[in-house]
Structure formats: C-alpha cells, structure tokens
Amino acid sequence: MDCGNDNVIYMDNNATTRIAPEVLDAMMPFLSGCYGNPSSMHTFGGQVGRAVEEARARVAELIGADPEEIVFTSCGTESDSTAILSAFQTYPEKRHVVTSRVEHPAVKSLCDSLTQLTGHKHRTTRLMVEADGTLDLESFEKALTEDTAIVSIMWANNETGVIFPVEKMAALANERGILFHTDAVQAVGKLPINMQENTINFLSLSGHKLHAPKGVGVLYIRKGTPFVPFLNGGHQENGRRGGTENVASIVGLGRACQLAAETLDEENTRVRALRDKLEQGLLTSIPRAMLNGHPKERLPNTTNVSFEFVEGEAILLHMNQYNICASSGSACTSGSLEPSHVLRAMGVPFTAAHGSIRFSLSVYNTEEEVDFVLEKMPPIIANLREMSPFWEENKA
C-alpha cells in the first residue's frame, strides 16, 4: 500500500511518529529469520531473548533506570491501567485516586470506569489547572488523604505540551505513603529524565511517540514498589506481565531509545527553535490568535494555538489540501464535536477552544516546512472567517 507521504508536512508527532529508518532496520531480522520464542531453552530462542534484554537495557539507560525496573507492555494505555489497578489491589482498603482534569483519556476513562464499576466506592479527585495549564502544588497537597492509594499525573500534557512538576509531587505523595504514577508518554525522548533522581513509583511510555512502532510500551516499576500484575499468564517479564513478548517491536523500541538519547540536545535546540518560529509566525500574522499553555514550561516540540471564530475541523481540512498534518487535540478523542477537555479545564473561551490547532514537531521537520505552513495558514484562517457570521460581529 502506498500512503503517498512523499510530500506530507507532518506536524502531528504527539499523535504518532514515523518509525526511524534505523529502528526498522533493527526490527527486520526479528520479523523473518530470528523468529524464536525468547522464553525457549534452546539457543535459537535464547539469542532472541538476549535481544530483548539488550532492548530493556537501552530503555533503562534513556530514563536513568535499572533494566530490572523495565516491563514491556503493549502500549501506554496498558501501562497506565496496570499501575493504577495494581495500587488498588495492593491497598484494597484505599479507594481514592488523585489525578488532573487534563489527563489523557487512558487515565481519565479508567478513573471514570473505576467509579462506575464499584458503585461509586472509588473516588477520584481531579485537580484544576491554571489558565496557562500549570498545576498548583498547594492544591495538590490538600487533595491527598489517608484513603489515597495512588496519584496519577502526566509528566507533560499531550495537547498543550505543558510540563508538570511530577518529581516534586511524587516526593510529597511518598512522604504520606502514597504511590505515584506518571504518564510520561509525551515526555520521554524530549526531556532529560533520570529516575535515580526522583521517587516516582511508576512511569508509562509508548514506543510510537518516539519513532518506534505502535503496539509496544513500557511500565517502569521502581524497585521495592509493591506490584500486582494486570495480565497473568506465563513467567514472562519476571512474572510481571504474562504473554509472549512482541520481540520485533521491543527491539525497535530499544533502538529508538538509543536514538532518542543521541538526539535529545537537538530536540531542545533545533526543534525548539523551529517550534518557536512557527508559533511566533502564527501569532503575529493572524489576528485574534492565542497561545494555549505556559509560554516556557512546555515540551520543546509542541505549540497549541487557537484561532477565534473558526472551527478546528475546518482548519484541518483546509490544511490537508496542502498535505499539512496537525491536530485539533488528542488523536484518542478525534471525531468528537466537543471542544478539548484540556482547553475547557484551562478556561479557554468557547469561541477559541473550538478553533485550536496543535502542532507537534520532531527531528525530521525542517525550516522549509515551517516556512510553508506560515505561508499557507494566514489565508486559510482568513477565508474561513469570511464565511463565519461570528467573525463579522466580533472582528473589531
């Protein structure tokens, strides 16, 4: 199948990333000749098992962890669910979870389900965010109770890129004997992370957010943290996650983590500069455009801009005519006509929230691509506003 991506300007990397060529090369042997089961006793399977362990070491190195603390999963969502459900099984007498109003659906929906399935015996406190998307530590401390089993706060928001002080939050939670989980799917590979320098108990990451394939993720479990598996079965992953390992994807993830470590400086210099050029160009060339999220405490690749009195879906359709790929929010909630729950929690006006576009760059983006987007976006917004009765009433 030819997806016709030769001329695509891809700025939707928080939704998914391309597989790096080096990652694909690393995977190919395990999709053909090296097909042994990594748990088998024979040499043919043993060499596959060694490749899995090498990948485990590469993931651990990227986040400053011990390889024994790395458990391979199918995705970030599985990792999130495993951490949170484990806490409630570890402490069945505790029925409270603290999270935020801007979490990814992987955490948000799980907390909703827990409340419904237990007849409201489980409680969820969802912390408010400020207008710039940041979290208040004082409000966080007040939310912790003796009944709190676990806190689950994302390291960086997928829609705005806003970074949360999860290391400080984990310390505050641990002081009270509360487990702490962070969905770091958007942060890993973009921010320096060293798990030896914090007290976070669980961390989730996903391969397809850092140029590895879809369908593979990781749950970091700090040594000494009580843990109950989500998937029971064989002895794989030291008994912490049953099921034969997705070897090719795991090897790919290991190589992707190695590449991410090598390009971390580029993410925070060249990619950040491209993001800033794109952002400033949009804000200065298009009237009534506004930035959503803290101007500095953000991922280096992400900008979320609202264009008042136009619909995000219409903007994306017009962008698509020029092969420009971006997003109006989380890919996991696309298709919904409701404005982003993240922007609503931030208090973004309804007239702006509906017209928000998230641009998320990667090391594969170029300055020429940014220039092209800056050339096409002003007339797209102007043309759409000409068709909007609300714009005519409010443009003054």
Image: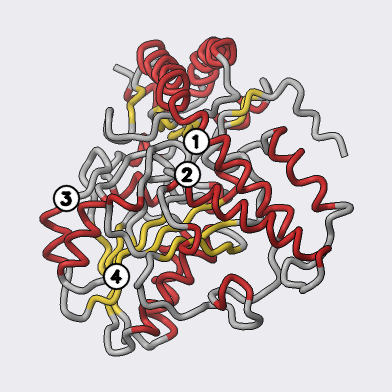
| Residue at mark 2 | 62
Question: Which corner quadrant holds the C terminus?
Answer: top left
x, y (%) of residue 85?
43, 77
Label 4: how many residues lie within 10 Å, few (<14), some (14-19) or many (20+)? many
Examine the image and state in which quarter residue 294 appears.
top left
**In the rendering, at what x and y percent does residue 143 appear?**
17, 66
Residue carrying label 4:
179
Residue 51 found in image quarter: bottom right
Measured Cα–Cα span from mark 1 to mark 3: 31 Å
Dot placed on the residue nearer the N-terminal end, 1 or 4? 4
- Give the residue at mark 1: 261
Q: Give the residue furthest to the front.
A: 43
Percent x, y of residue 215: 66, 56
Q: Which residue is mark 3?
A: 136
Could one spot residue 390 in this view of the protein? no
- The residue located at (17%, 61%) in the rendering is 172
